[in-house]
């Protein structure tokens, strides 16, 4: 009994302080405590997760570091021995300077021809590197660009080199004008603006070669170009040129006066697949000032050339394309000043009326059909009333004339082109010519054209 | 005579002033893009604030088009020029020069290369020559044919427009987010649709489709062109025919600007299907915009391939 009593007292003593302590704890403490415990547990989980992420990243960083080290080692191994440029003559080669080098391209144009010229029994069969053209170009500064083309050719009798084009283009002139200065191809119609290797045919149209030279006219000039605003929002391009008025058959060989050219072109986008460009040329210059002695002095700006040009293009689905192109020119030449010559050799100069045609004219029409990436074919028809000309001696006295009267020259030239790639083509052309002197000629041309590097041409 | 000249001169001057008025009286931001695809992306981001024109007609090979004078005039009046960068547009340099504005020249402040930030495929290693065909020096430039790259391009356009026209930044941002949201949803849907055909092999005419193939999870077993830009030869076609048979190639993809006779011939010999896909917006009539272009391409591909190959 005593033992039971003692045990009861001890129990009471043990329970009472606990009960008293429970009474002393503020209300909600347990809730807060459990929340804190939950938060701590959550934080522990987060830290553990973060540790995992950090470990993963450390592994990735290590792997990347190893990869970079290996790649660096590989790059170093692949690199050729670099000379100590600081010790090289010419000093250091700065990174990126190669971008300052001009864009360079080389174009080869080889033409073989077989002819059956009735005027020349031996014929004119030949194979020549007609052009080896080196083209260079790069921006000069933020406002301008320089382009040049130097052509070497391997003619039948001699090899020669020529600056075909070398001009500076200046952008951002007032009223959005663009200017070019240097040796250019004047904007006369369409074909004269093109390099030989850009032509669809092996040869130039007769009217171009007869009026402006075998390869078209290339001369030193200043060109201004702009688009004329108009209410119809039709692109109306106007080009004005002041040209060194020589080196074209229509003008003087050694003219001291410039020639002037204006070309106007309207472009029509008929649809997404059809386009039409129509242009007009007005060109005037001077005939031989330093040539034949004229009775009433030399005629200034005695040669006017008027031209019309047009190109229609249709793009078919499947990559084929039809092109119709034509140019027509007529001249108004002023021979009103009769020439002086000593026709009978008596030492006394007599007046000679030239009888030359003042209105030579010509046109061509080209139909070109590009079947696909590989083949194109077409035909060009030429019609020409050629330029009459005269011969004179060193003293300027007229010694003879070449007059064609009412005779015309015409030519038909079908051709077919194989594009081995965008940079290499082979072309076969047949030309039948009936010329103004009553001579016919049949010729077969074979052309190979190829290029490496850059071949950069302005938009046509 | 003098009076006549005076009258003509006054008439011309008056005409030029009168004619100038409607052309320049436009408040929209004028953008010229090289392709209709980029033009559509500009429109998606720029919304009504932009008036967009494009240079390369849809359905023509963008590598070699001849830009029209009308495009030159539009560029000369434009506020921004958007292009593919790299060496996609071989005509870009002369085109920009014809417009005569140095702000559009390389690194000019008003030109945007939308390829910025895109992971390029097939970047050549080491020295390259044209013995490898018309190879692209900086990598395959047909990157817009992976719709995931559409988001990068759209963001580039957004950043450029916002930089140039900060007043409209919020508007552009809303348009961008809307476009990306829509594109993301579509991408998920296309991926689901494409799941059954993943792993199949196709053949393409030109090397235009590596990005699309990667997105679709298909493999391009070869090209009809033996090298980029090089027309097919009989020897190469024989090799390709063998590949189609050996590797069970299901479809031959071509763009509308390539001739169809060669794909048809191969299809006839091997039983593969010929499939015209749209390599740009507007190339086929179903490809009205960037998203519908992929709708058309994905559906056409699935229809042509049908089901997963057993190979």
Image: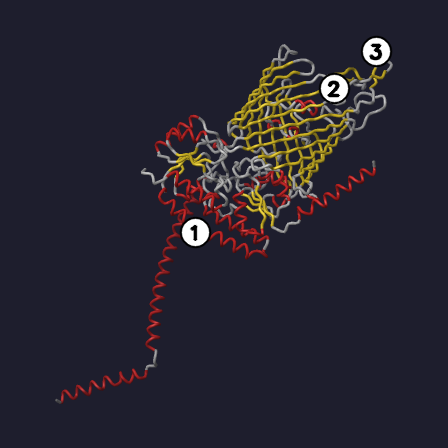
Looking at the image, is mark 3 or mark 2 nearer the viewer? 2
3 or 2: tag closer to the N-terminus = 3
Q: Position of residue A427 (x, y in %)?
A: 55, 23
Kindly state the secondary structure of the residue where label 3 is placed.
loop
Q: Position of residue A240 (x, y in %)?
A: 72, 35
Q: Chain of mark 1?
A: B
The image quarter in which residue A166 lies: top right
Q: Quadrant of the C terminus of chain A?
A: top right
Q: In the rendered view, tell whether residue A245 sits above or below residue B153.
A: above
Looking at the image, is mark 1 or mark 3 nearer the viewer? 1
Which of these two is toward me, A371 or A204?
A371
Q: Position of residue A322 (x, y in %)?
A: 56, 29
**Crowding at mark 1 (Cα within 10 Å: few <14, some 14-19, many 20+):** few
Q: Which label is found at residue A388?
A: 2
Which residue is tagged 1?
A: B185
Q: Are marks 1 and 3 on the same chain?
A: no
Q: Chain of mark 3?
A: A
Query: Do callouts 1 and 3 mark residues in contact (Cβ within 8 Å)?
Result: no
Looking at the image, is mark 1 or mark 2 nearer the viewer? 1
Q: In the rendered view, tell whether residue B70 sits above or below residue A190.
A: below
The image quarter in which residue A246 lies: top right
Q: Position of residue B201 (x, y in %)?
A: 38, 37
Q: Which label is found at residue A344?
A: 3
């Amino acid at each position: 009994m005593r033992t039971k009593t003692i045990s009861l007292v001890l129990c009471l003593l043990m329970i009472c302080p606990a009960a008293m302590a429970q009474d002393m704890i503020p209300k909600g403490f347990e809730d807060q405590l459990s929340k804190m415990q939950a938060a701590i547990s959550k934080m522990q989980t987060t830290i553990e997760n973060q540790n995992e992420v950090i470990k993963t990243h450390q592994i990735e960083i290590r792997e990347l570091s190893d990869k970079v080290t290996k790649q660096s080692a590989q790059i170093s191994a692949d690199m050729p021995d670099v000379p100590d440029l600081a010790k090289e003559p010419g000093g250091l080669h700065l990174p990126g300077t190669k971008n300052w080098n001009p864009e360079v391209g080389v174009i080869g144009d080889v033409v073989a021809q077989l002819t059956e010229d009735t005027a020349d029994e031996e014929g004119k069969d030949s194979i020549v590197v007609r052009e080896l053209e080196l083209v260079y170009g790069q921006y000069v500064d933020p406002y301008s660009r320089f382009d040049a083309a130097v052509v070497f050719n391997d003619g039948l009798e001699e090899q020669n080199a020529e600056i075909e084009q070398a001009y500076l283009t200046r952008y951002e002139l007032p009223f959005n004008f663009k200017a070019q200065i240097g040796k250019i191809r004047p904007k006369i119609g369409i074909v004269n603006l093109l390099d030989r290797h850009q032509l669809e045919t092996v040869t130039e149209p007769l009217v171009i070669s007869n009026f402006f030279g075998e390869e078209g006219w290339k001369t030193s000039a200043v060109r201004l170009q702009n688009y004329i605003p108009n209410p119809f929002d039709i692109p109306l391009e106007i080009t004005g040129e002041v040209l060194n008025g020589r080196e074209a058959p229509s003008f003087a060989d050694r003219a001291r006066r410039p020639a002037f050219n204006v070309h106007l072109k309207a472009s029509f986008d008929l649809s997404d697949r059809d386009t039409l460009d129509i242009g007009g040329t007005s060109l005037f210059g001077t005939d031989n000032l330093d040539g034949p002695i004229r009775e009433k002095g030399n005629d200034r700006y005695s040669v006017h050339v008027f031209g019309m040009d047009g190109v229609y293009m249709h793009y078919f689905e499947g990559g084929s394309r039809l092109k119709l192109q034509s140019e027509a020119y007529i001249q108004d030449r002023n021979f009103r000043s009769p020439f002086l010559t000593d026709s009978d050799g008596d030492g006394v100069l007599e007046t000679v009326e030239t009888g030359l045609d003042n209105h030579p004219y010509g046109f061509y029409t080209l139909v070109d059909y590009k079947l696909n990436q590989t083949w194109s074919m077409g035909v060009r028809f030429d019609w020409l009333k050629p330029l009459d000309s005269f011969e004179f001696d060193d003293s300027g006295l007229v010694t003879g004339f070449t007059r064609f009267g009412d005779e015309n020259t015409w030519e038909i030239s079908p051709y077919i082109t194989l594009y081995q790639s965008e940079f290499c083509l082979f072309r076969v052309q047949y030309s039948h010519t009936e010329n103004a002197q009553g001579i016919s000629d049949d010729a077969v041309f074979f052309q190979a054209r190829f290029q490496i590097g850059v071949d950069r041409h302005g938009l046509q | 005579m003098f009076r006549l000249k005076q009258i003509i001169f006054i008439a011309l001057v008056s005409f030029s002033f009168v004619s100038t008025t409607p052309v320049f009286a436009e408040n929209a931001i004028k953008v010229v893009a090289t392709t209709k695809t980029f033009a559509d992306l500009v429109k998606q981001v720029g919304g009504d604030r932009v008036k967009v024109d494009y240079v390369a007609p849809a359905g023509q090979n963008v590598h070699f088009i001849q830009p029209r004078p009308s495009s030159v005039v539009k560029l000369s009046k434009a506020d921004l020029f958007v292009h593919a960068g790299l060496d996609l547009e071989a005509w870009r340099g002369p085109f920009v020069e014809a417009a005569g504005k140095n702000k559009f020249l390389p690194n000019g402040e008003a030109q945007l290369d939308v390829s910025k930030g895109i992971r390029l495929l097939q970047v050549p290693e080491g020295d390259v020559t044209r013995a490898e065909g018309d190879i692209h020096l900086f990598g395959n430039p047909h990157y817009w044919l992976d719709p995931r790259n559409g988001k990068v391009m759209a963001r580039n356009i957004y950043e450029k427009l916002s930089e140039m026209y900060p007043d409209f930044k919020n508007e552009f941002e809303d348009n961008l987010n809307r476009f990306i949201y829509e594109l993301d949803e579509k991408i998920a849907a296309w991926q689901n649709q494409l799941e059954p055909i993943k792993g199949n092999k196709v053949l393409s005419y030109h090397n235009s489709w590596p990005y699309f193939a990667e997105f679709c999870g298909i493999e391009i077993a070869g090209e009809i062109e033996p090298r980029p830009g090089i027309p097919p030869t009989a020897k190469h076609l024989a090799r390709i025919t063998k590949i189609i048979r050996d590797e069970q190639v299901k479809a031959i993809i071509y763009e509308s600007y390539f001739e169809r006779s060669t794909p048809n011939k191969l299809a006839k010999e091997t039983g593969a299907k010929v499939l015209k896909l749209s390599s740009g917006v507007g190339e086929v009539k179903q490809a009205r915009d960037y998203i519908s272009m992929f709708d058309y391409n994905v559906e056409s591909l699935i229809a042509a391939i049908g089901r997963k190959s057993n190979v």
